[in-house]
Image (cartoon, helix red, strand yellow):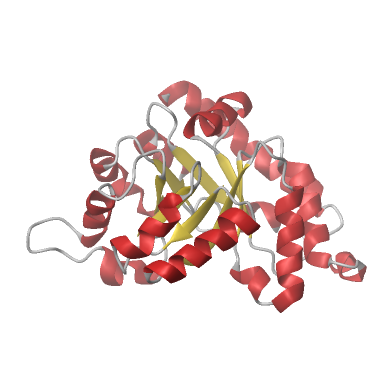
Protein backbone atom coordinates (compact mmCIF):
# COMPACT_ATOMS: atom_id res chain seq x y z
CA UNK A 1 0.00 0.00 0.00
CA UNK A 2 1.35 3.41 -0.95
CA UNK A 3 1.46 6.45 1.30
CA UNK A 4 -1.31 8.13 -0.71
CA UNK A 5 -3.53 5.05 -0.45
CA UNK A 6 -3.02 4.93 3.30
CA UNK A 7 -3.75 8.63 3.69
CA UNK A 8 -6.81 8.15 1.49
CA UNK A 9 -8.17 5.60 3.97
CA UNK A 10 -7.46 7.96 6.85
CA UNK A 11 -9.44 10.73 5.16
CA UNK A 12 -12.24 8.41 4.10
CA UNK A 13 -12.78 6.90 7.55
CA UNK A 14 -11.69 9.99 9.50
CA UNK A 15 -9.56 7.63 11.52
CA UNK A 16 -5.97 6.62 12.13
CA UNK A 17 -6.86 3.63 14.27
CA UNK A 18 -4.84 0.44 14.13
CA UNK A 19 -6.42 -2.56 15.87
CA UNK A 20 -3.91 -4.95 17.39
CA UNK A 21 -4.77 -8.61 16.98
CA UNK A 22 -2.81 -9.93 19.96
CA UNK A 23 -5.08 -12.93 20.15
CA UNK A 24 -4.45 -14.99 23.29
CA UNK A 25 -6.51 -18.18 23.31
CA UNK A 26 -6.63 -18.09 27.11
CA UNK A 27 -8.46 -14.73 26.97
CA UNK A 28 -11.02 -15.22 24.22
CA UNK A 29 -14.64 -15.96 25.15
CA UNK A 30 -15.15 -19.55 26.23
CA UNK A 31 -17.91 -20.29 23.72
CA UNK A 32 -15.45 -19.83 20.83
CA UNK A 33 -13.27 -22.69 22.04
CA UNK A 34 -15.80 -25.09 20.55
CA UNK A 35 -15.16 -23.81 17.02
CA UNK A 36 -12.76 -25.47 14.60
CA UNK A 37 -10.29 -22.57 14.75
CA UNK A 38 -11.01 -20.43 17.83
CA UNK A 39 -8.29 -17.87 17.11
CA UNK A 40 -9.49 -17.20 13.59
CA UNK A 41 -13.13 -17.14 14.64
CA UNK A 42 -12.31 -14.55 17.30
CA UNK A 43 -10.31 -12.44 14.82
CA UNK A 44 -13.01 -12.73 12.17
CA UNK A 45 -15.68 -11.35 14.47
CA UNK A 46 -13.37 -8.58 15.73
CA UNK A 47 -12.59 -7.56 12.14
CA UNK A 48 -16.26 -7.59 11.17
CA UNK A 49 -17.07 -5.32 14.12
CA UNK A 50 -14.19 -2.85 13.72
CA UNK A 51 -13.41 -2.62 9.99
CA UNK A 52 -15.53 0.51 9.52
CA UNK A 53 -13.41 2.37 12.07
CA UNK A 54 -9.90 0.99 11.53
CA UNK A 55 -7.40 1.83 8.80
CA UNK A 56 -4.94 -0.87 9.91
CA UNK A 57 -4.71 -4.21 11.67
CA UNK A 58 -1.62 -5.38 13.53
CA UNK A 59 -1.38 -9.12 14.16
CA UNK A 60 1.24 -9.73 16.84
CA UNK A 61 3.08 -12.69 15.32
CA UNK A 62 4.19 -14.23 18.63
CA UNK A 63 0.58 -15.00 19.56
CA UNK A 64 0.33 -17.19 16.43
CA UNK A 65 3.83 -18.68 16.40
CA UNK A 66 3.17 -20.01 19.90
CA UNK A 67 0.69 -22.52 18.42
CA UNK A 68 3.01 -23.90 15.75
CA UNK A 69 1.54 -24.85 12.38
CA UNK A 70 -2.04 -24.31 13.55
CA UNK A 71 -1.16 -20.82 14.70
CA UNK A 72 0.35 -19.96 11.32
CA UNK A 73 -2.79 -21.26 9.63
CA UNK A 74 -4.92 -19.04 11.85
CA UNK A 75 -2.70 -16.10 10.97
CA UNK A 76 -2.89 -16.78 7.23
CA UNK A 77 -6.68 -17.01 7.37
CA UNK A 78 -6.84 -13.80 9.41
CA UNK A 79 -4.68 -11.86 6.96
CA UNK A 80 -6.68 -13.17 4.00
CA UNK A 81 -9.93 -12.10 5.72
CA UNK A 82 -8.88 -8.48 6.33
CA UNK A 83 -10.45 -6.18 3.69
CA UNK A 84 -7.98 -5.38 0.90
CA UNK A 85 -8.13 -1.61 1.44
CA UNK A 86 -6.98 -1.90 5.07
CA UNK A 87 -3.27 -1.71 5.96
CA UNK A 88 -1.88 -5.00 7.34
CA UNK A 89 1.05 -4.70 9.69
CA UNK A 90 2.99 -7.76 10.86
CA UNK A 91 4.24 -7.02 14.35
CA UNK A 92 7.16 -9.44 14.12
CA UNK A 93 10.12 -7.33 15.31
CA UNK A 94 12.55 -9.08 12.98
CA UNK A 95 16.09 -7.96 12.18
CA UNK A 96 19.14 -10.08 11.36
CA UNK A 97 22.04 -10.23 8.90
CA UNK A 98 21.17 -9.43 5.31
CA UNK A 99 20.36 -12.83 3.82
CA UNK A 100 18.24 -13.75 6.85
CA UNK A 101 16.38 -10.46 6.75
CA UNK A 102 15.66 -11.08 3.07
CA UNK A 103 13.96 -14.37 3.96
CA UNK A 104 11.93 -12.69 6.69
CA UNK A 105 10.88 -10.06 4.16
CA UNK A 106 9.81 -12.69 1.63
CA UNK A 107 7.84 -14.51 4.31
CA UNK A 108 5.76 -11.50 5.33
CA UNK A 109 5.67 -9.45 2.13
CA UNK A 110 5.34 -12.18 -0.51
CA UNK A 111 3.85 -15.21 1.22
CA UNK A 112 1.69 -13.43 3.81
CA UNK A 113 1.07 -10.31 1.68
CA UNK A 114 1.46 -7.90 4.60
CA UNK A 115 1.96 -4.21 3.91
CA UNK A 116 4.47 -3.62 6.69
CA UNK A 117 6.65 -5.32 9.27
CA UNK A 118 8.21 -4.09 12.51
CA UNK A 119 12.01 -4.36 12.53
CA UNK A 120 14.61 -3.97 15.28
CA UNK A 121 17.41 -1.62 14.10
CA UNK A 122 20.15 -2.76 16.49
CA UNK A 123 22.14 -4.63 13.81
CA UNK A 124 22.20 -1.62 11.53
CA UNK A 125 21.82 -0.88 7.84
CA UNK A 126 22.44 -4.28 6.25
CA UNK A 127 19.84 -5.89 8.53
CA UNK A 128 17.18 -3.38 7.44
CA UNK A 129 17.92 -2.77 3.76
CA UNK A 130 16.56 -6.17 2.50
CA UNK A 131 13.09 -5.22 3.78
CA UNK A 132 13.26 -1.96 1.82
CA UNK A 133 13.73 -3.70 -1.53
CA UNK A 134 10.03 -4.56 -1.85
CA UNK A 135 7.92 -1.92 -3.65
CA UNK A 136 4.98 -0.39 -1.78
CA UNK A 137 5.95 -2.22 1.40
CA UNK A 138 6.94 -0.59 4.67
CA UNK A 139 9.55 -1.09 7.38
CA UNK A 140 8.52 0.11 10.83
CA UNK A 141 11.66 0.60 12.90
CA UNK A 142 11.59 0.45 16.67
CA UNK A 143 12.61 3.89 17.90
CA UNK A 144 11.16 4.84 21.29
CA UNK A 145 9.07 2.09 22.83
CA UNK A 146 6.62 2.30 25.71
CA UNK A 147 7.87 -0.67 27.76
CA UNK A 148 9.71 0.00 31.04
CA UNK A 149 12.99 -1.51 29.83
CA UNK A 150 13.01 0.65 26.72
CA UNK A 151 14.92 3.28 28.67
CA UNK A 152 17.82 0.89 29.26
CA UNK A 153 19.26 1.71 25.84
CA UNK A 154 16.95 4.03 23.90
CA UNK A 155 17.56 7.05 26.14
CA UNK A 156 21.32 6.66 26.52
CA UNK A 157 23.12 9.96 25.96
CA UNK A 158 25.61 10.05 23.09
CA UNK A 159 28.98 11.79 23.21
CA UNK A 160 28.04 13.88 20.17
CA UNK A 161 24.79 14.92 21.83
CA UNK A 162 21.25 13.63 21.82
CA UNK A 163 19.98 10.19 22.76
CA UNK A 164 20.34 6.83 21.07
CA UNK A 165 16.75 6.72 19.77
CA UNK A 166 17.34 10.07 18.04
CA UNK A 167 20.39 8.64 16.27
CA UNK A 168 18.24 5.72 15.07
CA UNK A 169 15.82 8.24 13.56
CA UNK A 170 18.58 10.27 11.90
CA UNK A 171 20.76 7.45 10.61
CA UNK A 172 17.92 5.32 9.24
CA UNK A 173 16.81 8.14 6.94
CA UNK A 174 19.94 7.37 4.91
CA UNK A 175 18.54 3.88 4.22
CA UNK A 176 15.03 4.65 2.97
CA UNK A 177 12.48 7.37 2.36
CA UNK A 178 9.37 8.57 4.15
CA UNK A 179 7.42 6.39 1.68
CA UNK A 180 9.17 3.27 3.00
CA UNK A 181 10.00 3.88 6.65
CA UNK A 182 7.80 4.36 9.68
CA UNK A 183 8.85 4.40 13.33
CA UNK A 184 7.45 2.90 16.52
CA UNK A 185 6.97 5.57 19.19
CA UNK A 186 5.09 4.64 22.34
CA UNK A 187 2.13 6.77 23.39
CA UNK A 188 3.39 6.76 26.96
CA UNK A 189 6.43 8.76 25.75
CA UNK A 190 4.32 11.68 24.54
CA UNK A 191 6.80 14.23 25.90
CA UNK A 192 9.22 13.23 23.11
CA UNK A 193 6.89 13.68 20.14
CA UNK A 194 7.89 17.30 19.48
CA UNK A 195 11.59 16.30 19.37
CA UNK A 196 10.79 13.35 17.14
CA UNK A 197 8.86 15.48 14.67
CA UNK A 198 11.85 17.81 14.37
CA UNK A 199 13.93 14.85 13.15
CA UNK A 200 11.31 12.97 11.09
CA UNK A 201 8.68 15.53 10.11
CA UNK A 202 7.25 13.57 7.16
CA UNK A 203 7.32 9.96 8.37
CA UNK A 204 4.42 7.94 9.71
CA UNK A 205 4.64 6.88 13.34
CA UNK A 206 3.12 3.68 14.71
CA UNK A 207 1.98 4.52 18.22
CA UNK A 208 1.15 1.72 20.65
CA UNK A 209 0.21 2.34 24.25
CA UNK A 210 -3.12 4.16 23.94
CA UNK A 211 -5.85 2.62 26.07
CA UNK A 212 -4.80 -0.18 28.40
CA UNK A 213 -1.26 1.21 28.77
CA UNK A 214 -2.51 4.69 29.61
CA UNK A 215 -1.19 6.78 26.71
CA UNK A 216 -3.02 9.99 25.83
CA UNK A 217 -4.54 10.05 22.34
CA UNK A 218 -4.97 13.81 22.63
CA UNK A 219 -1.28 14.46 23.36
CA UNK A 220 -0.12 12.02 20.68
CA UNK A 221 -2.38 13.70 18.13
CA UNK A 222 -1.51 17.26 19.12
CA UNK A 223 2.26 16.78 19.02
CA UNK A 224 2.61 13.88 16.58
CA UNK A 225 0.34 14.71 13.66
CA UNK A 226 1.78 16.05 10.40
CA UNK A 227 0.24 17.27 7.12
CA UNK A 228 -0.83 13.74 6.10
CA UNK A 229 -1.77 12.76 9.63
CA UNK A 230 1.40 10.67 9.93
CA UNK A 231 0.03 8.53 12.73
CA UNK A 232 -1.24 5.00 13.13
CA UNK A 233 -2.41 4.72 16.72
CA UNK A 234 -2.74 1.15 17.92
CA UNK A 235 -5.13 -0.23 20.49
CA UNK A 236 -5.14 -3.94 21.26
CA UNK A 237 -6.41 -5.04 24.66
CA UNK A 238 -8.63 -1.98 25.07
CA UNK A 239 -10.64 -3.11 22.04
CA UNK A 240 -10.38 -6.85 21.55
CA UNK A 241 -10.71 -7.78 25.24
CA UNK A 242 -13.21 -5.11 26.24
CA UNK A 243 -15.65 -7.95 26.90
CA UNK A 244 -15.08 -11.66 27.48
CA UNK A 245 -18.74 -12.52 26.97
CA UNK A 246 -20.70 -13.44 23.84
CA UNK A 247 -21.10 -9.74 23.09
CA UNK A 248 -17.30 -9.32 22.74
CA UNK A 249 -17.44 -8.31 19.08
CA UNK A 250 -20.21 -5.76 19.61
CA UNK A 251 -18.32 -4.18 22.52
CA UNK A 252 -15.09 -4.18 20.50
CA UNK A 253 -16.90 -2.30 17.74
CA UNK A 254 -18.17 0.24 20.24
CA UNK A 255 -14.69 0.82 21.66
CA UNK A 256 -13.24 1.18 18.15
CA UNK A 257 -15.94 3.69 17.23
CA UNK A 258 -15.26 5.71 20.37
CA UNK A 259 -11.60 6.04 19.39
CA UNK A 260 -12.51 6.82 15.78
CA UNK A 261 -14.84 9.62 16.90
CA UNK A 262 -12.10 11.12 19.05
CA UNK A 263 -9.66 10.83 16.13
CA UNK A 264 -12.17 12.53 13.85
CA UNK A 265 -12.13 15.50 16.18
CA UNK A 266 -8.32 15.71 16.24
CA UNK A 267 -8.07 15.38 12.46
CA UNK A 268 -10.31 18.40 12.05
CA UNK A 269 -8.39 20.25 14.76
CA UNK A 270 -4.77 19.55 13.84
CA UNK A 271 -4.67 18.47 10.19
Quarter containing the N terminus: top right
Near-viewer residue (64 or 180)? 180
Residue with the most extreme top position: 268
Above or below, 102 against 260 in this view is: below
Q: Position of residue 179 (x, y in %)?
A: 41, 38
Near-viewer residue (238 or 58)? 58
Above or below, 47 against 159 in this view is: above
> How many badges with numbers are in the image?
0
Residue with the most extreme left position: 160
Quarter containing the C terminus: top left
Q: In this view, does 122 lie to the left or right of 166?
A: right
Q: In this view, does 196 lie to the left or right of 230?
A: left
Above or below, 147 against 243 in this view is: below
Near-viewer residue (7 or 23)? 7
Q: Residue at x 48, y 49 (%)?
A: 134
Q: Which residue is drawn at 47% across and 58% down?
A: 118
Q: Residue at x 70, y 53 (%)?
A: 79
- One can see residue 27 in this view: no
Q: Where is residue 63 in the image (x, y as percent from the top left)?
A: 64, 70
Q: Residue at x 72, y 60 (%)?
A: 76
- One can see residue 70 in this view: yes
Q: In which quarter of the image is residue 199?
A: top left
Amino acid sequence: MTREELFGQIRKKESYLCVGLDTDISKIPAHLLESEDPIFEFNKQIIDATADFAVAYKPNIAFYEAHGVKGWQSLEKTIAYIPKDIFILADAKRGDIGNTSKMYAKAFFENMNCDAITVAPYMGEDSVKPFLEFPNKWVILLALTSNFGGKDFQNLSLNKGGELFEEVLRKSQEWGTADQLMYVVGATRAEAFARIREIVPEHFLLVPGVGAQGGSLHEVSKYGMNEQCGLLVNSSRGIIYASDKEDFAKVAGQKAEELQQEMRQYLSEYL
